[in-house]
Image (cartoon, rainbow, N blue to C red):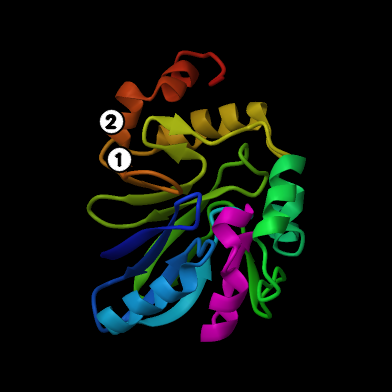
Amino acid sequence: MLIESFGAGPWLTNCYVLATGENSECIIIDPGLGAAPQIREIIEQKNLKPIATMLTHGHIDHMWSIFPVASGYGIPAFIHGDDRFLLNDPGAGVSIETKNALMDMMSTDDVFAEPSDTLEVTDKMTLELAGLSFTVLHAPGHTQGSILFEFDGDRKQIFTGDVLFAGAIGRTDLPGSSPVDMDTSLRDVVLQLPDSALVYPGHGPASDMATEKASNQYLLRVASGLSAL
């Protein structure tokens, strides 16, 4: 699988462009602030044709460019139903301080609304797009609609959004977050992933599940029956 990525905006949110290879269809995951030009550059360099964009959750740093990207290419946007409201009201998912800061960053060109073709995904839904087969895994905690994308292959590739990072997990002190739900998701979803699986998070470097199970202090706490935090 071809995986192109870059850090978008001041949060360096990982945006991914996935395809079976060059000269093929592709999927875009989490187009954050200012992501559109870099997405376009990858598409042109690799001669790709976008057919879908997908969100691991509805926080603004992951969906800032979802409207222009989906509308510009005429492709659907996939999101879990529990986070769909954030497409129209991104400030609802952040603190008051962050919301005020975002107001200063926004320009008159920014559009925060559902793309015309917005589709909801559900837990354990299987999809085949751009020649790639994958499963949606609902993992609430960071947001109520947080999901993982588990791509099939000899070695599974998991796009974890802000549920799991290399050596860390996502915040649970934001509006809509839940430490209790995060513990459940880490125990019942994340820790059940195979050790060989590669992890592509919403921020920071890639990892693998063997490393995370052995050294991620939050997973170790949950695995021992404690709360992650």
Is 188 on the left or on the right of 48, as rendered? Answer: right
Badge number at residue 207:
1
Disc 2 crowd rating (10 Å Cα; few below 14, some 14-19, many 20+) is: some
Q: Residue at x 58, y 51 (%)?
A: 123
Q: Residues within 10 Å of mark 1 (few under 14, many from 20)?
A: some
Cα separation, mark 2 vs mark 1, equals 7 Å
90 lies left or right of 24? right
Tell me if residue 129 can be seen: no
Residue 215 % position (x, y): 32, 22
Q: Which of the 4 image quadrants contains residue 45? A: bottom left
Q: Please state the extent of the stretch shown in magenta in the rendering.
A: 59-81
In the foreground, 101 or 155: 101
Evaluate if marks 2 and 1 touch, with contact meaning CB atoms under 8 Å apart. yes
Q: In this orientation, which residue lies closer to the viewer: 121 or 3? A: 3
Residue at image point 40% right, 79% down: 40
Instruction: State the image coordinates of residue 155 (x, y, percent, origin top left).
Output: 24, 50
Identified by mark 2, the residue type is Thr
Give the vertical position of 47 relative to 63 (above or below).
Answer: below
The residue nearer to you, when weighing 119 against 179, is 179
Number of the label disc, if any, that sits on residue 211: 2
Task: Tell me where residue 119 appears, x and y as whole percent.
Answer: 64, 70
